[in-house]
Every structure is written in C-alpha cells, then in structure tokens.
Image (cartoon, grey):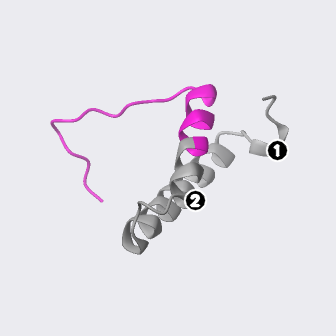
Amino acid sequence: MVEDPVIPPMPLRLQELRVLMHSLKLGLDSEDINTEDKEVVRRLMARIDRFAERQGAYWDKVDT
C-alpha cells in the first residue's frame, strides 16, 4: 500500500484510538450503514487492533 503524499501520517494517542474504536463499534450497530461499509469498518478496526498490540496497548488493560 502506497501512502498518499498529500496527506501526512496522523499519529493518534491511545485515548484517541479508544474513542475512534468506540465510534467504529457504534457504527457497526447502526442500521444506517450498509453491509459493504460495515465490512470496511471491521477491517479498519482489525488494523487498529493489530497496530495497538504491536505498540503494547491492549484494550482490555486500558482504564476507561
């Protein structure tokens, strides 16, 4: 995958990732989002999970 040269990487703090994951989970429960978009959300959540785990962050060990 080639990164877009116009849009620089946007590192997120753990708290920001947690909010993003929460928002994505809410989107999966929404009836306003179609099946194809929900699959994109699932893949995005999986990528975030893999990234966070590589960084040593585990969602079940994060204080809410």
Residue 59: x percent and y percent? 75, 43
In this picture, residue 7 sits left or right of residue 60: left
Q: Nearer the viewer, mark 2 or mark 1?
A: 2
In this picture, residue 9 sits left or right of residue 41: left
Residue 7 sits in quarter? top left
Please, what is the three-letter code of the amino acid marked with disc 1?
Asp
Q: Is residue 63 above or below residue 5?
A: above
Q: Is residue 54 above or below residue 29?
A: above
Which residue has dot 1 on it? 60
The C terminus, quarter of image = top right
**Element under disc 2:** helix
Residue 27: x percent and y percent? 51, 53
Which label sits on residue 29?
A: 2
- What is the crowding at mark 2: few (fewer than 14 residues within 10 Å), some, or many (at least 20)? few
Q: Residue at x 57, y 59 (%)?
A: 29
Q: Is residue 48 above or below residue 34?
A: above
Residue range in magenta is: 1-22
The N terminus, quarter of image = bottom left
Residue 3 highlighted magenta (yes or no): yes
**Element under disc 1:** helix
Q: Residue at x 72, y 40 (%)?
A: 56
Please, what is the three-letter code of the amino acid marked with disc 2?
Asp
Q: Residue at x 26, y 48 (%)?
A: 3
Q: Earlier in the sequence, mark 2 or mark 1?
A: 2
Question: Is label 2 in contact with label 1 (beta carbons under 8 Å)?
Answer: no
Residue 5: x percent and y percent? 17, 39
- What is the crowding at mark 1: few (fewer than 14 residues within 10 Å), some, or many (at least 20)? few
Distance from the alpha carbon under mark 2 to that under mark 1: 21 Å
